[in-house]
Image (cartoon, rainbow, N blue to C red):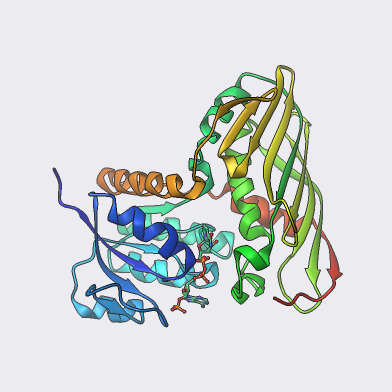
Amino acid sequence: MSQPIRLALIGLGKIAHDQHLPAIANDPAFELVATVSRHGEAIGSLPFFATIDALAESGIAVDAVALCTPPQVRRALAATAIDRGWHVFLEKPPAASLVEASALRALAAAKGVSLFASWHSRHAAGVEPARAWLAERMLRDATITWAEDVRHWHPGQDWIFEPGGFGVFDPAINALSIATRIFPRALFVETAEIEIPANRAAAIAATVRFRDEAGSAIDARFDFLKQGTQSWDIVAHTDGGTLTLSEGGTALAIDGDAKASGADELASEYPALYRRFAELVRAGESEVDLSPLQLVADIHLKARIRIVDPFAW
Ligand code: NAP
């Protein structure tokens, strides 16, 4: 049995507390050796630093870091870690831009460390069965509906509406990480309209029509102002029936018959992400699929922009 991977967790916000800390604690492949956060608090007696530089200068032995900050500061932190020879687990989205992400991939390769651009939604229970089912059928059309209340899920997270914060594409990129996994052909952005609040820099809603390489239409609606029932659903009509992947990829039904269902979506996705990260580190490999980020970038390249009412929390 090899030694545990000595891991430091950087960015102690919602996802770090809700998912990363429990997943790390339950995975014997990792030993949490330090945390880093400008304003957070130490976890018990675990070494705690305000910056990644302070961690590096502390002399604590670190093999890898997991970066749970907002995307705007991810590239600089990852570059510092890679430069130190540390393996890097990137929360989604992997960076604030495509070039930032691909530069990190090149840096990790040059330095011989593992870089893992994680997409947690791809580990939801219904995603791999959906991929296998769709691979054997011809897609006719599909709809993606990702509609949630930003005030409920991201209260006070101002970074999300800052430049590089992704706005509604913070959750929408989860839908696109699933879509790029389950649909067998590449997706192109045909038309897009992005709605940006007059007082913010990033989208609060968007309507997108994709087409796949065979010409099938995939219509998406992304909405950050959804009240009442929240939706994280993909419905695909094929020559062999209708696939419904709902609850963020957790629940799969074919022609209305339930096929897969996971009890608690994120709670099962993060242990799978850490298992994958350990595999990559042990194998000396990286996994950096930028296709969801490419689609978000293409949507912004091709979109008509509509300025809408100011947003307040
Ligand atoms: P959050 O609660 O706002 O936490 C982000 C943390 O990063 C903060 O605690 C902050 O701690 C640190 N940070 C470092 N530099 C920062 C900066 N310039 N601006 C703001 N914070 C900074 O955010 P989160 O919900 O955990 O999301 C973090 C990442 O995880 C995002 O990329 C998000 O897409 C992803 N994610 C979130 C969820 C979710 O359900 N929330 C689910 C999956 C993935 P200090 O101020 O103490 O440094």
Image quadrant occupied by the N terminus? top left
Q: Nearer the viewer, residue 149 or 76?
A: 149
Whether residue 83 is visible to the viewer of this picture, yes or no, is: yes
Q: Position of residue 51 (x, y in %)?
A: 36, 80
Q: Position of residue 47 (x, y in %)?
A: 24, 75
Q: Position of residue 62 (x, y in %)?
A: 23, 65
In the image, residue 188 sits, relative to residue 222, either above or below, namely above
Query: In this rendering, would 257 be left or right of 261?
Result: right
Image quadrant occupied by the C terminus? bottom right
Q: Nearer the viewer, residue 258 or 233?
A: 258
Query: In this rendering, would 137 be left or right of 65?
Result: right
Residue 162, image quadrant? bottom right
- Total marks shown come to 0
Q: Nearer the viewer, residue 225 or 111?
A: 225
At a point 39% along the width and 58% down the height, the residue shown is: 20
In the image, residue 303 sits, relative to residue 249, either above or below, namely below
Q: Nearer the viewer, residue 171 or 266?
A: 266
At a point 53% along the width and 34% down the height, the residue shown is: 261
At a point 31% along the width and 80% down the height, the residue shown is: 49
In the image, residue 153 sits, relative to residue 146, either above or below, namely below
Query: In this rendering, would 291 be left or right of 195?
Result: left
Whether residue 167 is visible to the viewer of this picture, yes or no, is: no
Extreme residue in the front direction = 228
Q: Position of residue 36 (x, y in %)?
A: 35, 75
At a point 35% along the width and 53% down the height, the residue shown is: 23
Query: In this rendering, would 123 be left or right of 59?
Result: right
